[in-house]
Amino acid sequence: MRAYYEYPLLRELAFLWPPLFYWRQVTLRALLRHLPDEAPPRLLEIGCATGFLTRKLRERYPGTEIWAVDLSRRAIRRAQRRRLPGVHFRVADFLDRLPQRGFPLVVSMNVFQLLPQDLAFQRLRDLLAPGGRALLTLTSETLLTRWHRRLYRALARSDVCLDSPETVARRARAVGLAVELAPIEATEGSYLLTLQRL
């Protein structure tokens, strides 16, 4: 999967293509709408890539300490060029145990469908502070995402989880997380999963 992400500039350019640009903006707006009003003292972004969402989080919460992690060394180098104050960009695999824990807020945009779900939700629960919340955007199976899945399998030699939101929610509940679901956009079957560690 790493090789697919080793070309961050190409990925950035791909998101300028009108359909991808539109879906990304719709997903971003939905995620930002559901963020808590009160700024957390710190937050974690999983799969930050070159810092597209990180910049929005910095604007929303100017005093919050932000940890942003991604697998791609090249993407993190590009993200660091943004010079966002109070943001710690790190090359890290979320599925390995991160040294930081106890986050009151974790966010991730279209990353969790690329991860082994049972393990990913366990790791997420371990990273959240008691009462902490996670906001994740994912996609489910549609004509569009079935095509994307084929492309992703060819490029990344890995798979994409396109299970229904209800199935994904059950996995999160199974590790002790409270779950809320909200649809985002029908064409790509996108939805917002809001989780809370009890």
Image (cartoon, helix red, strand yellow):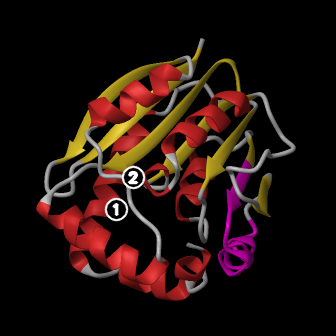
Q: Nearer the viewer, residue 21 or 70?
A: 70
Query: Where is residue 128 drawn, in percent x and y?
Result: 68, 28
Q: Amino acid at mark 2?
A: Leu
Please tell me which residue is depicted at 47% across the width and 58% down the height of the picture: 114
Q: Amino acid at mark 1?
A: Arg
Q: The N terminus is located in which quarter? A: bottom right
Question: In this rendering, would 164 be left or right of 85?
Answer: left
Q: Image quadrant of residue 92?
A: bottom right
Pointer 2 with pointer 1, Cβ within 8 A: yes
Which residue does the numbered mark 1 point to in the structure image? 24
Please tell me which residue is depicted at 36% across the width and 38% down the height of the picture: 192
**Can the viewer see residue 66 in this picture?**
yes
Query: Distance between the Cα atoms at labels 2 and 1?
Result: 6 Å
Query: Where is residue 159 drawn, in percent x and y?
Result: 41, 64
Query: Where is residue 109 drawn, in percent x and y?
Result: 47, 52
Q: Is residue 160 above or below residue 185?
A: below
Q: Which residues are magenta?
A: 67-83
Please tell me which residue is depicted at 38% across the width and 74% down the height of the picture: 152
Q: Nearer the viewer, residue 90 or 65?
A: 90
Secondary structure category for the residue under label 1: helix
Residue density around tag 1, few if under 14, some if 14–19, many if 20 or more, within 10 Å: some
Which residue does the numbered mark 2 point to in the structure image? 28
**Can the viewer see residue 15 in this picture?**
no
Question: In this rendering, would 71 be left or right of 157?
Answer: right
Secondary structure category for the residue under label 2: helix
